[in-house]
């Protein structure tokens, strides 16, 4: 979004008692540089990390830090009346819980209960806190009420541990604020058929062949496309991810099931994005009963190929853009170019897999975009939700032929 489109907007920036509170100063500067009016709210513990005077000088407005300092003008009500958005950054696990439970024992909690504008929450916490079931439950509760959660990043934490808990980067948070204040609707009229996650091929009723795909990249693209106005049907292998708002999810397990679900909806789509990690092999003779350890004599497991979904759909295409993903450990461009040519695709997005920076299961990713007759286009590492918008920008430039308007039933 341009600075002109952000000018005149009012954001309430709520800062809580995290070591990452100092990063809110950078966020404040970014927002004011975009012409946004920022009003800062601080919890009492946040004032121990950064002096309120810092925010007052940079915002040009007094900081609200308790219910009683602004009682004469009812600031806890007046600020939310003026706000176009409330941004809680950083948000501690304690504040996340209070917001989910509707507690109003401080000025931030009270404001949240009177809020009539969008709420964006940027958690930051140490150790294993973010992955704790209670914290995840609070985040899901807030999402179910319409709050937008900007997930923390992986990296070194204040304790010296390594894990997911670092406050998301300034540009990621700013991008989310921009999308909320001035949402892009450039995919209106588009019908996106998208696959995500792994497939599972049974060996017996309790064992299967699969891979480490989490589905995060595909789900991020589905979320971004729906937010930008597209109708989205997501054909998903087994994952623990929540279906994005406004997206129709079709759950599948095997490659055959994924092929059937995609084929049934392919004519409806204007764009196919094959982000799923489809297993290439399956057991030739899956067993109907569990194979006991003492029944296995060490013989090789006979395998056969699963269907080539992209190749099958490519042979049926009429008007669809077709985008594939390639997961490679080496020679990324060479292998990606081969897939682009052999599957007759409009674009291939190549991921590096293996190692700490593997695309599989990670919250961030870096890719190389390949299209016919153009040079490879590398995209540096960023959170997958942010990357999803960057990829949609490039996909939108691909030509698409006129089509009819069939129904996606």
Image (tube, rainbow, N blue to C red):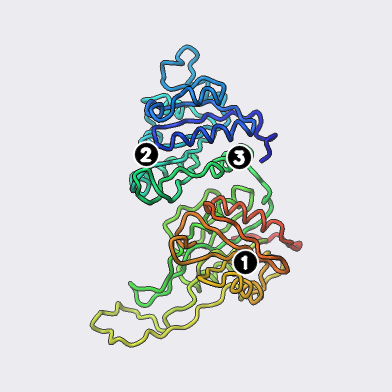
Q: Residues within 10 Å of mark 2 (few under 14, many from 20)?
A: many
Q: In percent of the image, x 25 and y 80: which residue is there?
A: 293
Q: Which residue is mark 2?
A: 93
Of the 4 image quadrants, the one containing the N terminus is top right
Which image quadrant is residue 97 in?
top left
| Lower position in the chain sequence, tag 1 or tag 2 | 2
| Lower position in the chain sequence, tag 3 or tag 1 | 3
- The image shows residue 304, relative to residue 171, as above or below, that is below
Residue 316 % position (x, y): 66, 73
Query: In the figure, is residue 82 to the left or right of 122?
Result: right
Q: Which residue is mark 1?
A: 348
Element at label 2:
helix
Of the 4 image quadrants, the one containing the C terminus is bottom right
Which image quadrant is residue 343 in?
bottom right
> How many marks on residues?
3
Residue 370 % position (x, y): 65, 66
Query: In the figure, is residue 197 to the left or right of 138?
Result: right
Q: Which residue is mark 3?
A: 178
Which image quadrant is residue 69 in?
top left
Could you tell me how far apart the alpha carbons at marks 2 and 3 are, in whole angstroms? 25 Å
For this rendering, which residue is in front, 244 or 25?
25
Element at label 1:
strand
Q: Kindly check if marks 1 and 2 are in contact, taking CB atoms under 8 A apart as contact.
A: no
Q: In percent of the image, x 73 and y 69: which residue is there?
A: 373
Q: In percent of the image, x 63 and y 52: which residue is there?
A: 230
Residue 14 % position (x, y): 47, 30
Residue located farthest toward the top when viewing the structure as drawn = 72
Q: In percent of the image, x 42 and y 41: which residue is there?
A: 124
Query: In the figure, is residue 388 to the left or right of 2?
Result: left
Element at label 3:
helix
| Lower position in the chain sequence, tag 2 or tag 3 | 2
């Amino acid at each position: 979004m341009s600075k002109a489109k952000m000018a005149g907007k009012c954001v309430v920036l709520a800062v809580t008692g995290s070591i990452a509170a100092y990063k809110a100063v950078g966020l404040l500067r970014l927002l004011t540089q975009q012409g946004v009016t920022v009003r800062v709210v601080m919890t009492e513990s946040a004032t121990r990390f950064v002096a309120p005077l810092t925010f007052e000088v940079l915002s040009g407005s007094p900081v609200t830090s308790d219910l009683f300092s602004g009682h004469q003008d009812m600031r806890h009500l007046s600020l939310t009346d003026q706000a176009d958005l409330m941004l809680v950054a950083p948000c501690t696990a304690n504040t996340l819980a209070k917001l989910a439970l509707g507690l109003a024992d401080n000025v931030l909690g009270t404001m949240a209960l009177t809020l009539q504008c969008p709420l964006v929450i940027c958690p930051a916490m140490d150790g294993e806190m973010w992955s704790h079931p209670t914290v995840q439950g609070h985040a899901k509760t807030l999402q179910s009420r319409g709050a937008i959660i900007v997930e923390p990043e992986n990296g070194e934490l204040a304790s010296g541990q390594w894990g997911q808990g670092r406050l998301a980067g300034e540009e990621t948070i700013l991008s989310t604020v921009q999308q909320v204040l001035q949402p892009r609707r450039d995919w209106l009229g588009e019908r996106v058929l998208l696959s995500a996650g792994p497939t599972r091929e049974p060996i017996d009723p309790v064992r299967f062949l699969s891979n480490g795909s989490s589905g995060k990249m595909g789900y991020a693209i589905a979320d971004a496309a729906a937010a930008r106005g597209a109708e989205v049907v997501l054909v998903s292998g087994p994952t623990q991810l929540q279906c994005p708002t406004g997206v129709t999810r079709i759950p599948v397990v095997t490659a055959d099931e994924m092929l059937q679900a995609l084929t049934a909806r392919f004519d409806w789509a204007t764009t196919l994005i094959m982000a799923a990690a489809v297993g290439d092999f399956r057991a030739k003779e899956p067993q109907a009963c569990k194979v006991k350890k003492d029944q296995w004599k060490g013989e090789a497991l006979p395998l056969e190929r699963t269907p080539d979904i992209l190749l099958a759909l490519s042979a049926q295409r009429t008007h669809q853009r077709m985008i594939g993903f390639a997961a490679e450990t080496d020679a990324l461009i060479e292998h990606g170019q081969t897939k682009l040519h052999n599957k007759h695709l409009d674009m291939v997005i190549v991921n590096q897999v293996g190692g700490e920076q593997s695309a599989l299961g990670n919250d961030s990713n870096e890719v190389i975009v390949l299209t016919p007759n153009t040079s490879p286009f590398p995209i540096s590492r960023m959170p997958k939700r942010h990357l999803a918008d960057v990829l949609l920008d490039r996909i939108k430039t691909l030509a698409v032929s006129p089509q009819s308007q069939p129904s996606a039933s």
